[in-house]
Amino acid sequence: MEVRVKTNRALIFCSGTTEYLYAKSLQMELPRNRRGAISVEVTNQRACDPWALAQEAVQKKKQANRDRNPFNNVWLFYGNPSIEVPDLLRYIGSNGLSGAYCPICLEQWFILHFEDFAATFASRDEAVEHLTRIWPLYKKNQIDAYTELKPLLPLAIDRATTANRQPTIPGTETVPIFTVQSLLIFFDSLRQAS
């Protein structure tokens, strides 16, 4: 008789290729016996609206429940949160999802590996341009970004934590919020549980 072992399954639902490649790198760092429990997917929407991403993730979660193969954790991994951040965060939380995000794009997270830069950018292009000045070898949708930045990860986490504590940043109206470090902590807990 075959015994089925219940596995803790997780879905990391990514808004774009950069997030997908970063999450896949995290997945590949897991011990082999844990990799299969993590599903990393990218949305099929062209222009990712965080609300649409969250709604699509909720549908995937419901479908997995109907298929009797539920996810224990569902993460949204995205940049450019909508203006209604509190409402979006309430929606994510009320549907049992977790969020890993940056104010504009994942490149803002990459910048924190090199410098203490918490100001917001006007656009993704501006953030990418700034990143390529401090990391000249960076290419959009770079496959090995996580691997190359890994030695600087503690600095990025500290800088993101500091940015999250700032009540205001001079010259801006909003506070940048980084929660990518929460996703890293989640992956670390999976490594430790193995």
Image (cartoon, grey):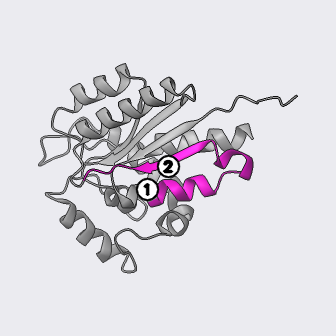
Side of 91 where 4 appears, left or right: right
Residue 45 in percent (x, y) is at: 26, 50
**From which residue to which does the magenta span run?**
21-45
Crowdedness of circle 2 by 10 Å Cα count: few (<14), some, many (20+)? many
SS at mark 1? helix
SS at mark 2? strand
Q: Viewer-proximal residue, 67 or 158?
A: 67
Side of 137 where 118 appears, left or right: left
Label 2 vs 1, first from the N-terminus: 1
Q: Residue 67, labelled with which disc?
A: none
Name the residue at the top extreme.
94
Q: Residue 40, labelled with which disc?
A: 2
Q: Residue 20, labelled with which disc?
A: 1
* Image quadrant occupied by the N terminus: top right
Amino acid at the residue labelled 2: Val
Is-magenta flag for residue 33?
yes
Residue 57 in percent (x, y) is at: 37, 35
Q: Viewer-proximal residue, 24 or 181?
A: 24
